[in-house]
Amino acid sequence: MEEALRKAEEAELDLVEISPNADPPVCKIIDYKKFLYNQKKKEKEIKSKQSKIVVKEVRFGPNTDDHDFEFKLNHAKKFLEEGAKLKAFVFFKGRTIVFKERGEILLLRFAQELEEHGIVEQMPKLEGKRMIMMIAPKKKTK
């Protein structure tokens, strides 16, 4: 240990313990500041390669008309092509909650139209005043 410290001082570098649990402990003679800098650089690079999942929302009413449906469908296709997840939901206001079936039919039709662009992750289910369905983008084949 003393010999390693002496060698590090002669080279004007630091003695860094790499794995203290090993028998004998593994040490390296390196510039510690440079070591930390490179470590941060690697972490940053790994972090930049991670993909962040974006969730876009498309909202319908239970009585959404065909033109509005087509308009929102085109937006949804664009979102899925960009690689974002899609959260489509029907919002029931006041007494429109009695049209649950109509909302479910609307969401299933929406999923069917987006079949070539995305995969249904979660089938329509009612949560409070909203019926929610999740659609994930299809993986691009290279």
Image (cartoon, rainbow, N blue to C red):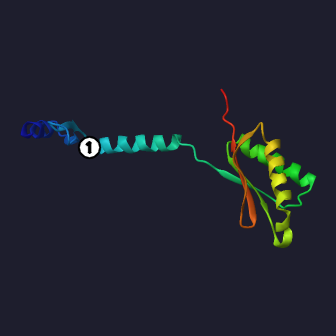
Amino acid type for the residue under numbered disc 1:
Tyr
Instruction: Count the labels in the image.
Output: 1
Where does residue 49 sit, x and y in percent of width and height?
52, 40
Of 116 and 2, the residue lying toward us: 116
Quarter where residue 91 is shown: bottom right
Residue annotated with mark 1? 32
Q: Is residue 4 left or right of residue 88?
A: left
Of 24 and 129, the residue lying toward us: 129
Q: Is residue 124 left or right of residue 24?
A: right
Quarter where residue 6 is shown: top left
> Residue at 20% of width from left, 42% of height from top?
21
Where does residue 81 sit, x and y in percent of width and height?
73, 40
Quarter where residue 140 is shown: top right
Residue 15 vs 65, above or below: the answer is above
Where does residue 79 sit, x and y in percent of width and height?
73, 46
Q: Is residue 103 left or right of residue 140?
A: right
Where does residue 136 sit, x and y in percent of width and height?
68, 44
Of 115 and 1, the residue lying toward us: 115
Secondary structure at badge 1 equals helix
